[in-house]
Image: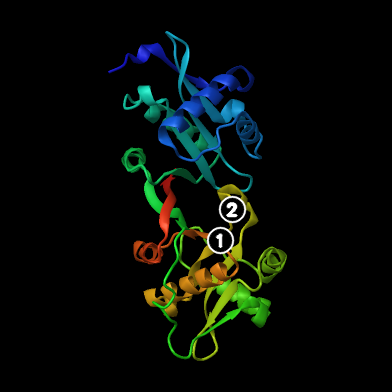
Amino acid sequence: MIDMDNFLLRLLKPEDDFAALVELRAQIEAADQDGVNVTEAALQEQLRVPGHNPAADRWVMVETTAGEMAGHALVWLPPEADAAQVQAAVRPHWRRQGLGTQLMEAALGRARVLGARQAVVQVNGLRLETDLIVRRWGFQFEGAYTEWRNTKPVDFTEANLPEGYRLLSYGEVADLTILTRAMNEAYAGLWAHMEVSEAQMAEWLPQFNADGLLLVFDGNGKIAGISRTEPSAERSTANQRPTGYIDAPGFLPEHRQLEHYRALLQAGMRWLRNQGMEWIELESWGDPPERLSVFEKAGFVLIRRVNVYTKDL
């Protein structure tokens, strides 16, 4: 056990501690491989986000003998929000000594002072030990964001929509009311999905590829499901090969059979392959394990998982 008398928990001094904090974050990311941007520019941007006061909302744990920064914590309460984002992280060789608990307690205490109703923490879901740590701090699992990649040819003959169902692009439908209903009801009840208005959809629509915005209608001509697919210039640049994007398929509650998800997913993949996409990447928010298995069976490999936990204050 370490001698806690050799450690000092104090508020961050933004200017004086900046270089040491950049170095600490780089060391933590090198060990954990969480995909966090730990550059100086990224930290400077984070220190300036609305609703965050670095001198009052961030802490560091300093090992006083050598003056090494051993860990850091923060709280961020966005304007008009009642849930505060909190983080606590410790340099690898100082872990499992209770430092992270002290840092998190400081962040939670500040969140209460700020009037937050709830604290939210996001962790790398591919590291199983983080689940034990955050649960020990009193957090409960809320949901997960996952990102997937498919780099192999796929057999598109496996799944089909039921007889009478129709798959149309938004370019063929061109009905904002139907699109808004699909976006709202196909993901209803899933973590991280919020209801959108027609005005919001109208604002977003120019950013979507109308031919790749796929809509499923049931045998009665009613909207049943949706999946947004599009060639992605940003992902193609990052991967150095043509890469398509799929926002995970969604279905209205009465149509949520796994075969429906499989058929719509493969339809999106087929469309992207026809656009010349060599890789396909997919994002999912809150889909349950049985639906995630559909992605795996279609040849997708999990490349990122972020688990979200909450704690009432």
298 left or right of 204 in image: left
89 left or right of 273 in image: left
> Which quadrant would the N terminus be assigned to in this image?
top left
Residue under the point 63% across and 39% down: 51
Foreground pick, 251 / 119: 251
Residue 296 location, quadrant:
bottom left
Please tell me whether mark 1 sits on a helix, a strand or a loop.
strand
92 left or right of 23 in image: left
Picture disc at residue 245: 1
Q: Tell me whether the residue at label 2 lies in contact with that at label 1, contact meaning CB atoms closer than 8 angstroms.
A: yes
> Which quadrant would the C terminus be assigned to in this image?
top left
Q: Would residue 166 be seen by someone viewing this image from the given angle?
A: yes
Amino acid at pointer 1: Tyr
Please tell me whether mark 2 sits on a helix, a strand or a loop.
helix
Q: Position of residue 275 (x, y in %)?
A: 60, 68
Q: Would residue 81 be seen by someone viewing this image from the given angle?
A: no
- Say above or below: 189 vs 7: below
Mark earlier in primary sequence (2, 1): 2
Q: Position of residue 250 (x, y in %)?
A: 49, 70
Residue 33 location, quadrant:
top left
Foreground pick, 45 / 272: 272
Residue under the point 47% across and 72% down: 266
Picture disc at residue 235: 2
Q: Real-space Cα distance between discs 2 and 1?
A: 8 Å
Q: Position of residue 308 (x, y in %)?
A: 44, 49
Amino acid at pointer 2: Arg
Foreground pick, 271 / 198: 271
Give the number of marks.
Answer: 2
